[in-house]
Amino acid sequence: MAKKPQIVILGAGYGGMIAATKLQKKLGSGEAHVTLVSKHKYHYQTTWLHEPAAGTMHHDDARIEIDKVLNSNRANFVQDTVTSINKDEKKVILKEGGELAYDYLIIGVGATAETFGVEGVFEHAYHKWTIDGVRELKDHIEFQFSKYRNETVHKDEDLTFVVAGAGFTGIEFIGELSERVPKLCEHYDVPREKVKMYVIEAAPSALPGFDPELVEYAMNLLEHRGVEFKINTPIAEVKENLVVLKDGEEIPASTIIWATGVRGNKLIEESGFEAMRGRVKVDADLRAPGEEDVFIIGDCALIINEETERPFPPTAQIAMQQGAVAAENVMALIRGGTTSNLKPEILGTLASLGGKEAMGTVNVSFLKGRKLYGRSAYFMKHMSDNRYLMKLGGPLLVLSKGRNPF
Amino acid sequence: MAKKPQIVILGAGYGGMIAATKLQKKLGSGEAHVTLVSKHKYHYQTTWLHEPAAGTMHHDDARIEIDKVLNSNRANFVQDTVTSINKDEKKVILKEGGELAYDYLIIGVGATAETFGVEGVFEHAYHKWTIDGVRELKDHIEFQFSKYRNETVHKDEDLTFVVAGAGFTGIEFIGELSERVPKLCEHYDVPREKVKMYVIEAAPSALPGFDPELVEYAMNLLEHRGVEFKINTPIAEVKENLVVLKDGEEIPASTIIWATGVRGNKLIEESGFEAMRGRVKVDADLRAPGEEDVFIIGDCALIINEETERPFPPTAQIAMQQGAVAAENVMALIRGGTTSNLKPEILGTLASLGGKEAMGTVNVSFLKGRKLYGRSAYFMKHMSDNRYLMKLGGPLLVLSKGRNPF
């Protein structure tokens, strides 16, 4: 009897979770061993993290215990951190627990902040969009309010919040924060006008890739809530409690949030994959170039949008599609078949703006290409969140962790 | 027609509030003008502050808007800070709003931390038992947990909590914190054994003045929850994130709470009253020695317990009795009568220990001198809290701000 093939999945993000659940569902009993490796014993919804970051959602609502979704009879879970991948010996080295040999590897180890060479980001800015990272950011924000109020001499910088980056993450975060600020002011007996919020963007427009009308809608709404935008304004350096702009202006701020985008996990380059900003330009079937048995998905995979000839931005919906295709392709190889190619499909791009506000476009059936604003965008965004949970864990997961679209 | 006498009350603590509400109830219409001056537009229950400090109660539940209790037709309220009292010209100087002339003055401006000469307390320890102070402490505590968890290299001092002083305040605070720590650990994904709690006391016993059996009960209970006591251990100095003991030991701790007792507001000495540690040894009718028309109550008044020949500790129950007597005496003087003396009555001394735990003695009717533990002490403590609210604002106030004794 031949040894059962070992499938190892690294990372429990959107891609890894979809791959793992698909494999446990579709593999015949005894057809292969599946092992999922993750640093944490939970999966978290990165695309929701702007909410616990600003304190408008409990962080537990943005995470799911892996053993709630993974069936331990059909897949193993190893809680550990991957320190390196040895492609030649086909094994993964773990921090705590030795090594894992694989026949097929699916890598979905996520991203870290892209600083574009700006000094001081890792030291002085909140940059980790993880459960641990946003929980600290939320507590830090609240602490600034209570500290400000309790100081004999109030320091304006304690109530100044600077978001670097007016892309998806930055806008969604400031949407939540600006929505919450009036409540924070009430809770902490602080006058509303003492709070300053800035969003600083190096590019010539906020929300690149969005329709200009949608960008205007979002900016007007946020400005109405007191957010000040500085567009076309690169940052020179981040210091302790200080943002230095390239034009020489300095903004003292006790809370600096870095949201200028991500690059792939450094594990990728450290393990000898050729990568650009930590992302591997994968083959159409998601294998790393020249590798027979290694698939790369999510934030570490670079795929080109043929229509625009530019890379797809790393999003949850692409990661999920990649997770599914990688799982199918591993099964095909085990069964002696051939792999299929990913056909990326953008079902919509919706940004939430705090409260019951959102905006974006949807590309499904009768709404194809339609711009949505306000409540209808909010509705569609939450419906799509629920669709993901349905895919991951069925209706009970939607019930326990789903979102009310109304 | 003679000018109506001006009665000015400084401070909206227990004493000032009881004096103000008694005067507004008992003075005939047009008999006198009553003005209450306070820094904040709310009264707060100092004896409850260990709960919002540890995060087991919302800070709003420990404060009452003054206009909910004071009838603006019968008494004025001035929100301002007193900068000095000019006894000779019989006026009070305010920070924002000029001066207030008085015919009768009741001073109840509270206390500040007593450091006993230890350096660094004001700079590096939480020492303000006020709404603003405990709100910051609570947020600081939570921030330490999230910071610890999110750090790449965890720092043990971030989860070390040092309380200086094993008196009433220190014990009640650590009671709440030790009760909450398991919940904090769960919320922040932190192992329980990482949290260290110390109570450091210079005196040879915790809870001086309590029966040794009660002290043992409290210490056992708190030790069981993980609190470590260092009794007979004076503190030499407080530095940033460090407590230095006289015996040379150093305890690194990101959270240091100062609870070694209080001294009277410095306003007292600055205004030329003869005082010991900010407290004036008042006459039996609560007038400042040599003053015809100035009454001092609460933490700024020193009165001697004739049974023990030692000063009564400054407590809420004494402050309330003083507020009532000062109000009665001012009315007597206005009406051409003579003043009466305070007959201090200790109705009980109950310390809460977190959760549904408390201990202490009660001196009323059938329970006279009885030692109480656990639930029954908790019941009596909350009943007495409610009695105060009843006195202050009647049954509706008990309903909105009262405590469930069960």
Image (cartoon, coloured by chain):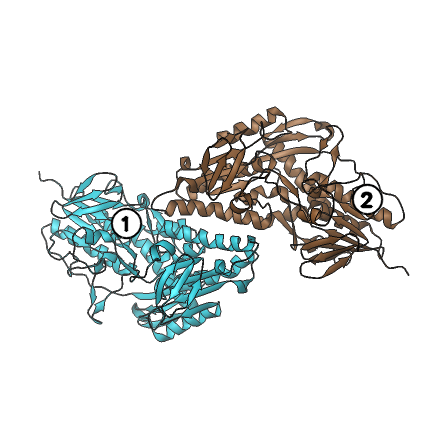
Chain colours: A cyan, B brown
Residue B348 vs residue B281, the one in the foreground:
B281
Residue at image coords 47%, 46%: B142
Q: Secondary structure at mark 1?
A: loop
The circle on residue A12 is 1
In this figure, which residue is indicated by the disc labeled 2?
B290
Q: How many marks?
A: 2
Q: Is residue B238 left or right of residue B321?
A: left
**Where residue B356 sits in the image (x, y, percent)?**
56, 35
Q: Say if B200 sits above or below A368 in the image.
A: above
Residue A42 vs residue B93, the one in the foreground:
B93
Q: Is residue A127 left or right of residue A86?
A: right
Q: Say if B220 sits above or below A67 in the image.
A: above
Sort mark 1 into few (<14), some (14-19) or many (20+) by Cα contacts within 10 Å. many
Mark nearer the viewer, 1 or 2: 2
Residue B399 vs residue A314, the one in the foreground:
A314
Q: Can residue A151 be seen here?
A: yes
- Three-letter code, disc 1: Ala
Residue at the bottom extreme? A213
Q: Quadrant of the N terminus of chain B?
A: bottom right
Q: Say if A9 sits above or below A289 in the image.
A: above
Q: Quadrant of the C terminus of chain B?
A: top right
Marks 1/2 in contact by CB < 8 Å: the verdict is no
- Three-letter code, disc 2: Gly
Q: Can residue B58 be seen here?
A: no
Residues at discs 1 and 2 both on one chain: no
Sort mark 2 into few (<14), some (14-19) or many (20+) by Cα contacts within 10 Å. few
**Where residue B251 sits in the image (x, y, percent)?**
46, 36
Residue B332 vs residue B379, the one in the foreground:
B332
Label 1 marks which chain's residue?
A: A
Label 2 marks which chain's residue?
A: B
**Where residue B374 sits in the image (x, y, percent)?**
58, 30
